[in-house]
Amino acid sequence: MGEDLRVMTRLPVSLQSLLVQCAALLLVALLALLLRSLIPFQAALWQFALVQGATAAVLSRLWRQPVWWLPLHFGFFPVIVLAQQFSLPAWIYLAAFLLLVLFYWSSFRTRVPLYLSDRKAWDAIIPLLPQATPFRFIDIGSGFGDVPFYLESRFPQAQFSGTEIAPAPWLISRVRSWIRHSRVRFLRRDYAALDLAGYDVVFAFLSPAAMPQLWQQAQSQMRQGSLLISLSFEAQARQPDLVIPLAEGARHTLYAWRM
């Protein structure tokens, strides 16, 4: 059972969520049929949707998905039912789909959703960086560019870059850079296609599924003495040289490895 669960958690998050929703729908449909055979009860559609959402949230937790998936699973089917009541035009659904594509362009393939770090993590990075010598820093999966923007003013001698494959976050970070007259360089490129040997510090906030590949890439490319920093997710192949708790729980921890 434990091995089966580990195999399932390696699936892309989008596929996991699809399976959770389908399983919840099937379970609630079977429950409704059972109730109808026992008692004269016909659930309203909104009742069915709420029970399906609650079931999906429970299954998501049992599958050990990140906790922020619970409200998404709970609200997914009820929101669809609610939207049908308003007879929304078809273009709204298309627009919503395109918006999701722009923000989650490659999540199915990379298994890395859009995660956003916070200021506690940015402050914890500062003591790990060279204080008096120039260095090259890259944030892989840089999202909206918050990390390099925050560090840039504190390390004027450093060169900061970010790479993001999803079109919308990349474009937002480029616009923010232009507005701020920032020196941060943002690439729209998969980090797996980069040569990490060109950087002294590599920062990542990815996902457990992506860490084994990143670790292999870092070992084969990063120069001796360079630093790999990961927020929330460990590289299981080697114990980190430094562990910095930011808040209670493993998902609020900074890990660092000296290569």
Image (tube, grey):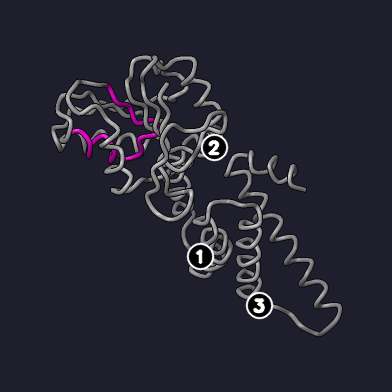
Distance in Å between CA atoms under marks 3 and 2: 36 Å
The residue singled out by tag 3 in the image is 44
Q: Residue furthest bottom?
A: 40
Q: Of the residues shown, which amino acid type is indicated by label 2?
A: Arg
Mark 3 or mark 1: name the one nearer the start of the chain. 3
Is disc 3 surrounded by few (<14), some (14 to 19) or many (20+) residues within 10 Å? few
Q: Of the residues shown, which amino acid type is indicated by label 1?
A: Ala
Marks 2, 1: nearer the viewer: 2
Q: Secondary structure at mark 3?
A: loop
Is residue 216 visible in this depiction of the protein? yes
Magenta part of the protein: which range?
Answer: 136-152
| 238 and 72: which is toward the camera | 238
| Left or right relative to 21: residue 135 | left
Distance in Å between CA atoms under marks 2 and 1: 29 Å
Q: Secondary structure at mark 2?
A: loop
Q: Is residue 180 above or below residue 221?
A: below
Q: Is residue 201 above or below residue 92?
A: above
| 162 and 135: which is toward the camera | 135
Is 137 magenta? The answer is yes
The residue at the point 36 percent across, 38 percent down is 143
Is 178 magenta? The answer is no
Is disc 2 surrounded by few (<14), some (14 to 19) or many (20+) residues within 10 Å? some
The residue singled out by tag 2 in the image is 111
Is residue 204 visible in this depiction of the protein? no
Mark 3 or mark 2: name the one nearer the start of the chain. 3
